Image (cartoon, helix red, strand yellow):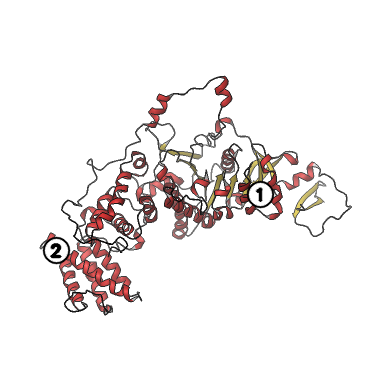
Amino acid sequence: MPLGVIRTARGQDGQVVRRLDRGLLGFPTVGDPVRLPEASEAEVVVPRVSEPDALLLGTAPLAGDASVMVSGKRLFGRHVAVLGNTGSGKSCTVAQLIRGAAAATDSHVGTLRAIVLDLNGEYQHAFDGLDPSIAIKRFSVVSSPEATGVTQLRVPFWLWNYREWAAFCGASGKSQAPVLRQALHLLRSSDTQSFPRGTVRIVAGRRSVRAHKVSEDKESRKQVFEVLAAVKDACESLAVESPGQLSAVPALQALLDRTLKTRLNPPGGDYRFKFDVIPLAMSEEAALIDAMDAALAELRVPMGEGDTSSVDTPITFDARNLVDLTGVIAAGMQGDAQSWIAPMQDRLAVAMNDARLTSVCGFHKDENLATWLTSMLGESGKSQITVLDLSLVPATAQHVLASVVGRVVLEAHERYRRAAGTDAAPVILVVEEAHSLMRRRGEFGVDEAGVDMAELCRETFERVAREGRKFGVSLVISSQRPSELSETVLSQCNSFLVHRIVNGRDQEAVRRMVPDSVGALLSELPSLPSQAALLIGAAAEVPVLLRVGDLALEYRPNSADPAYETAWTLGMPWDVDTLVSAWLATPIPVEEHDGDEPKSDWDLDGYEPPDYELDPDDPPF
């Protein structure tokens, strides 16, 4: 396998200097002499950069145990994949990568930031013993505030965007998702406790009128009048509930009444807007928008509420109000909407009462976007390694929590560049057991629960893989099943540390990701011992077999092989009482409102569904 040419020259001090030039123009012919390289010649092939950010990965056994030093910029500047079967040393390699980056960080002015998504709880002590200037923060679903060195994991509900909520709730696109979207609009943008019933319809009407002028579809231009008729009914209800207290709402009602009478076809109104309808004139559109703005201002709804730009804004709110609020919105819709919303409400109610989930995602009064980002990424100009232990997170939420973390980290760096005009300090995002969070398309079972959340998680990390590099977010993925990994994520990895892989399907997946010229090297993967790996890709000029550096026992991830010999010869304990006590322990309680239950002025007791039914495939308006 011709790789290049070793050039020999003498330096100014007379010492022999050798360098490797990749590629060659002339090839050996039959009969040319062949010999094994000397140790000094073999060392030339081993990466040994002398840059300030150089990382020591290990030694090269085939090159006289020469040190393997790679550029941190070339390694983390793209993305890295650490692959190999269980027990081959992947977790120790990942720990060595981060510890190597910490060793290369200046303790006075340097800034290292890394987040480890730990799905198995392996990295609790993997980063102990580093320079004190690097803060190590560990987050988990802790069972008590006294848990040493571990802080309560927080990924609050208000940080989730609409797609993450819809996947978590299993909201159907035709009936439940629109109601969930409107509820999130209200919770994020306004004081929901002060909203009278019917406000959402005015918001929907304003949005429909704004979209009316750009719509070229005849049916869509007619449908706006159905929405306006619903807004008129809402104004009538609001005026009855608050007689004499409102002025802008009755004025909007009168304007809508005059506008709708000119469009009824036939004039008697028996077939409302079913035939051709004269579109709204520009003057009518302006008058309606002004009247709706005035009515919403009178109802204390902030300007711009309900626009699509606010549905994903990470503004704090108490998610327990979603259960009642979705019911209120459904109660104001035509037809038996509540019966279609009830399954989603049940799922929300169960989630809001799961202590493990609410301890991680519930509402805290003293928490906001700034405090959350600081806890995850550290303070300005300071180094931090953050370990997120997701091992005890409910399986139904593990994908969505990982997705939220990955998305927010990427968006934070993207928005920082736009706001500050400069790049933020880069962050290394480590994903253990990556095949669980970013499975390739088609690997989801037909009847598997949580498929929507798993697909959402995969899409999030595919976006991080595609776009993260230019914003300073580098992925380090670790997996024992590369054949199950998203091909998009693997294709974006430029450096590979490949440990022992026995399965032929996994070998083939790796072979597709590396250049053809090194494909033959992968046939040696089944015979590699633990701690040995092939370094392939941008971090090394040529593929190198290396022995990853030793990691002290106290710093090794908790992923050692089961101690069968110790158990069989010396005995090992099985303390059921300790296990049960930890298993049934109550998580840290979520901070409540002043009362026992969240405040809510939404009264559903007086609502009786109409006699006619709503088709679940129809939109809510």
Label count reads 2
Amino acid bearing label 2: Ala
In the displayed orientation, state which residue is furthest to the top: 570
Residue 108 placement, left or right of 420 = right
Front residue of 408/448: it is 448
Quick check: marks 2 and 1 in contact, CB under 8 Å? Answer: no
Can the viewer see residue 252?
yes
Within the image, what quadrant is residue 502 found in?
top right
Describe residue 318's horizontal placement relative to residue 139 as left or right: left
Q: Which residue corresponds to the image point at 42% horizontal and 38% vertical from the top-left?
A: 392
Count neighbours of disc 2 (C-alpha within 10 A) and say few if under 14, some if 14 to 19, many if 20 or more.
some
Residue 152 percent coordinates (x, y): 39, 38
Secondary structure beneath dot 2 equals helix
Q: Image quadrant for the C terminus?
A: bottom left
The relative height of residue 448 versus residue 571 in the rendered view (above or below) is below
Residue 111 can be seen, yes or no: no
Residue at the limit of the structure toward the right, as seen here: 31
Residues at marks 2 and 1, CA–CA distance in whole angstroms: 71 Å
Q: Residues within 10 Å of mark 1 (few under 14, many from 20)?
A: many
530 and 284: which is toward the camera: 530
Q: Which residue is mark 1?
A: 536
Q: Is residue 120 left or right of residue 165?
A: right
Q: Earlier in the sequence, mark 2 or mark 1?
A: 2
Query: Which numbered tag is attached to residue 12?
Result: none
Q: Amino acid at mark 1?
A: Ile
Q: Position of residue 178 (x, y in %)?
A: 32, 60
Q: Position of residue 37 (x, y in %)?
A: 81, 44
Question: Which residue sits at x=30%, y=74%?
Answer: 221
Residue in view at x 39 percent, y 49 percent? 370
Q: Which residue is mark 2?
A: 239
